[in-house]
Amino acid sequence: MTLSALFPAISPEREAELLASVPTGLLINGQWRDASDGGTFDVHDPATGEVLATLASATSEDALAALDAADAAQASWARTAPRVRAEILRRAFGLVTARAEDFALLMTLEMGKPLAEARGEVTYGAEFLRWFSEETARDYGRYLTSPEGKNKILVQHKPVGPCLLITPWNFPLAMATRKVAPAVAAGCTMVLKPAKLTPLTAQYFAQTMLDAGLPAGVLNVVASSSASGISGPLLKDARLRKVSFTGSTPVGKRLMADAAQNVLRTSMELGGNAPFIVFEDADLDAAVEGAMAAKMRNMGEACTAANRFLVHETVAQEFTRKFAAAMGALTTGRGTEPETQVGPLIGAGARDDVHALVSAALDAGAVTVTGGAPVDGPGYFYQPTVLADVPHDAAILGQEIFGPVAPVVTFTTEEQAIRLANSSEYGLASYLYSRDFNRLLRVAEQIEFGMVGFNAGVISNAAAPFGGVKQSGLGREGGTEGIAEYTTTQYIGIADPYVG
Ligand code: NAD
């Protein structure tokens, strides 16, 4: 009997029916088709290791065919009325929302997150479609008289041109909508390469965009078992004008180097190492609640995941006790089970990496308060874990854990907390807990992070500019800033008709 047969909430028939409805080909110029060499790759369920689907694996030739289509569609798409583009996005929002249960189940199946969380991602991911449908018609230029009065200055925004969008496996819908929606809003055409571990949601989303009326060639999708086989030829091709990447910092650096050859616009949403700082005047119950959200969303497999818990020495014991009790009470299982709160990690390698970090921390003097080991059985599960007494120089504090593990470190003064928070090459999300608003603002001024949560464990929002500083990346997604990543500025100088 398969594991899925054990869970009556989602029947195997329902899973099979949904999987059968996901396009398995490459989307090029509005048509789903096979790879040029007939190649395929399998997508697995990380809770069971079973194959969910087999997709066409794009070759370099297919990637160039996708760029041919994007390039051919660019001029007419750029001229499409903003209102028309806005209406397509609004219809796509409606369709994703109507298909929310399908999207949620697909994400749970291919990525492992519990269904309740997957539903949350559908809401979050769909919101980019609605937000950018609203932004489409409000991308203003300007017209002014030059200071010396001799010229008029006209400034307009134009679509940057065909874009390569590369997305990671951890948020299969939201990472796609966060790029596709502003590109559509700005009038850009696209080649989307989803992560090979979780491409099914992107395939289903692309079909949804077609159903919403997106013209052929505007969005092309080339899932592939060879990521560099797609990005390599595209980044060399002068017709491509931009690459927007979300993923790890090492891959982002490589893509930036390759993008330099043609001086491409780049948006880079890279890794994080979020500090979660609990000051002595914090509401500890609220901090524990926030810590659970900031740590355990996506089983800790999030760039915004709280990675380092910096807790004032006078409250560290109480915070750690309450936090460990909450972590230890979580139910681990396949995401389709109604009671599951913690799903599997994405693969065996990911689970081994997490355990190696935990083991090294214990060797360095940390102690396990709860968890600390992989879970036996099929799938790649790891126990929700809290480590205390973690030394300031432990390796686990220096890199993304990407798993359900919370190292707690104590500090004595505000200055020390700030220094510890900033001692990372990353600068994406950060979380501060205190009842003193002046202190929160004072610390926010001094920490080097693109995003700061005040007494809040989840801060992502389609209306807010998401992004990092330092090696966490370049550019912002969402907010009013998001559309600017896909436009270029043109200035037109006009001789003033009244000045000779
Ligand atoms: P990854 O860098 O391994 O892969 C990301 C994407 O890049 C995938 O589509 C992958 O196929 C592709 N890729 C891999 N090697 C490539 C290459 N040589 N050339 C071109 N493309 C290549 O990252 P991942 O494991 O999928 O995702 C986890 C990472 O993403 C973490 O570091 C996480 O912090 C980061 N992330 C960042 C954000 C953000 O917004 N800042 C959001 C989610 C995830």
Image (tube, helix red, strand yellow):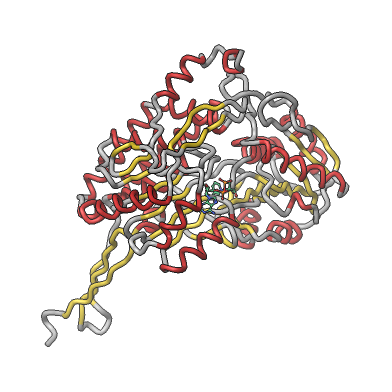
Res 434 seen here = no
Q: Residue 54 appears at what percent x and percent y?
A: 47, 31
Q: Residue 435 appears at what percent x and percent y?
A: 66, 46
Question: How many labels, in total?
Answer: 0
Q: Residue 266 appears at what percent x and percent y?
A: 45, 61
Point 63% across, 48% down: residue = 431
Res 8 seen here = yes
Point 38% across, 50% down: residue = 61
Quadrant of res 18: top left
Quadrant of res 398: bottom right
For the N terminus, the quadrant is: top right
Q: Is residue 133 left or right of residue 412?
A: left
Q: Nearer the viewer, residue 37 or 242?
A: 37
For the C terminus, the quadrant is: bottom left
Q: Nearer the viewer, residue 372 or 195?
A: 195
Q: Nearer the viewer, residue 318 or 96?
A: 96
Q: Residue 114 appears at what percent x and percent y?
A: 57, 27
For this orientation, the residue located farthest to the bottom is 500
Q: Nearer the viewer, residue 340 or 130?
A: 340
Point 40% across, 29% down: residue = 22
Q: Is residue 40 left or right of residue 154?
A: right
